Amino acid sequence: MYTLVEAIWIILPAYAANGLTPLIGLKKKLHTIDGGRNFIDGRRILGDGKTWEGFFLGTAVAVVIAIIEMLAYPYLPWNISPVRLDIIPMSPFTGLLIGIGAMLGDVGGSFIKRRLGLKRGCFAPLLDQDDFVLGSFLLLSLYMPMKVKWIILLLIITPVFHITANIVGYKLGIKKQPW
């Protein structure tokens, strides 16, 4: 349970970044990261779903959430826990790393999906759900040590959170597919 609290604390900016970027797709005239170009295999590099607007919005959202965590940290009752929680203090910089990592992980997942011949919106179990988590932890681990148990726990629970959020987004008309 305590490891879960630690893990959610560290990944919350990435969850928000990944979860809110589809909202940018509600606007028209977006700028795709790949510029509409194809890879050497003749398929799109990333596809229309990966835009600069989404990348920067996701990163900004992660920074904002990290700032909120930073401001809330002193007021949260960490001392009532019967065990010592290893809570990483947040800052705008850690939020920036988490946000960029989440967006790069998502872009990497899209690149892999295109190489596998999967179209935008096609269900790709684990790849769709865990790419942003891996990207966040990889980039953040260059700055501070990450616990392996956080990563393992989040790789297990994130698909459940992700699929639930996507179903809600689908029912609200924000997402085109419920995955």
Image (cartoon, helix red, strand yellow):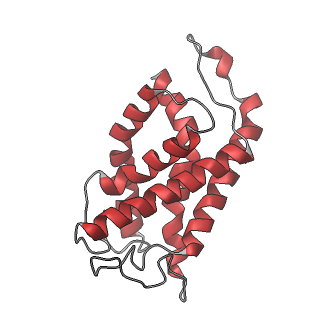
Q: Is residue 108 left or right of residue 25?
A: left
Q: Residue at x 41, y 56 (%)?
A: 165
Q: Is residue 90 left or right of residue 162?
A: right
Q: Residue furthest left?
A: 117
Q: Residue at x 41, y 74 (%)?
A: 173
Q: Quadrant of residue 153?
A: top left
Residue 61 percent location from the top left of the image: 63, 58
Name the image quarter holding the C terminus: bottom left
Can residue 178 be seen here? The reply is no
Q: Quadrant of residue 39?
A: bottom left
Q: Nearer the viewer, residue 136 or 156?
A: 136
Q: Residue at x 68, y 52 (%)?
A: 63
Question: Is 12 above or below relative to 112?
Answer: above
Q: Residue furthest front?
A: 40
How many callouts does the rendering have?
0
Residue 53 percent location from the top left of the image: 59, 74
Q: Nearer the viewer, residue 82 or 121?
A: 121
Name the image quarter holding the N terminus: top left
Q: Is residue 116 left or right of residue 163?
A: left
Q: Residue furthest top?
A: 82
Residue 93 percent location from the top left of the image: 71, 46
Can residue 99 be seen here? The reply is yes
Question: Is 62 above or below relative to 43?
Answer: above
Q: Residue at x 58, y 62 (%)?
A: 58
Residue 47 percent location from the top left of the image: 39, 77
Question: Is 72 above or below relative to 147?
Answer: below
Q: Nearer the viewer, residue 129 or 114?
A: 114
Question: Is 59 above or below relative to 147?
Answer: below
